[in-house]
Amino acid sequence: MKMLFHQLILDAIVSGYLVANTPSYLYQRLRQIRAIQNLPLNTPSEELISEFRKVTSQKPGSVDEIATAYAILAAITFLDYPKALQVLSTLDLSKLDWGQDFRDIFVKNSRATNVFDLRISPFSQPLILQANSSTRIIPLEQQNSSATQD
């Protein structure tokens, strides 16, 4: 199996697993580890899935294997929401005592968001600054240059 985590990081992951007494505690603890947050940035999601399946192809036996499986699940939760939800829905989480709980916590606590990139071009029409009997119309370029001169 490819080494996803440096030994020091693995020690922190195992430590978090060993002291966890609830799935939500483990979920939150693992999500605080920077290496887990960065894993989806440096590792393709297909590789994360593959590694998770390797670790859980049999019921994980060692504490390192169990903790690694949970760490991969936590890393998957940092993918874009639709991708993370799709991946978590396709994985067999039955070999981990809290696997289904991890998925449920993710779904409960996450909110799908839509991001729109709006590009607003500057006005090319003159801008009316005052409206009275002596209304002045000042082009935007002049307004910007006069504002910087003040």
Image (spheres, helix red, strand yellow):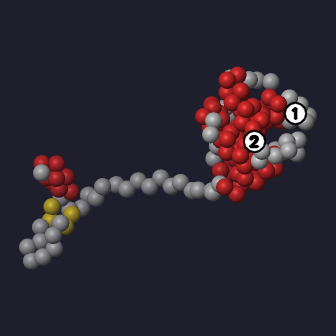
Q: Secondary structure at mark 1?
A: loop
* Residue 60's disc number: 1
> What is the CA distance from the residue labelled 1 to the residue labelled 2?
17 Å
In the image, what residue occupies the spot 70% across and 51% down? 106
Residue kind at label 2, given as amino acid type:
Ala
Q: Residue furthest right?
A: 58
Residue 131 visible here: yes
Task: From the image, tell me which residue sits under label 2.
Answer: 20
Residue 134 in the image: state x and y as whole percent.
Answer: 8, 73
Relative to residue 8, is residue 50 drawn left or right? right
State left or right for residue 117 relative to residue 92.
left
Q: Tag 2's secondary structure?
A: loop
Circle 1 packing at 10 Å, graded few (<14), some (14-19), many (20+), is some
Indicate the amino acid at tag 1. Answer: Pro
Q: Nearest to the eye among marks 1 and 2: give it.
A: 2
* Residue at position x 77%, y 44% in the image: 21
Q: Nearer the viewer, residue 129 or 14?
A: 14
The first of marks 1 and 2 along the sequence is 2
Going by the image, does 79 lie left or right of 62? left
Looking at the picture, does residue 21 appear above or below residue 140?
Answer: above
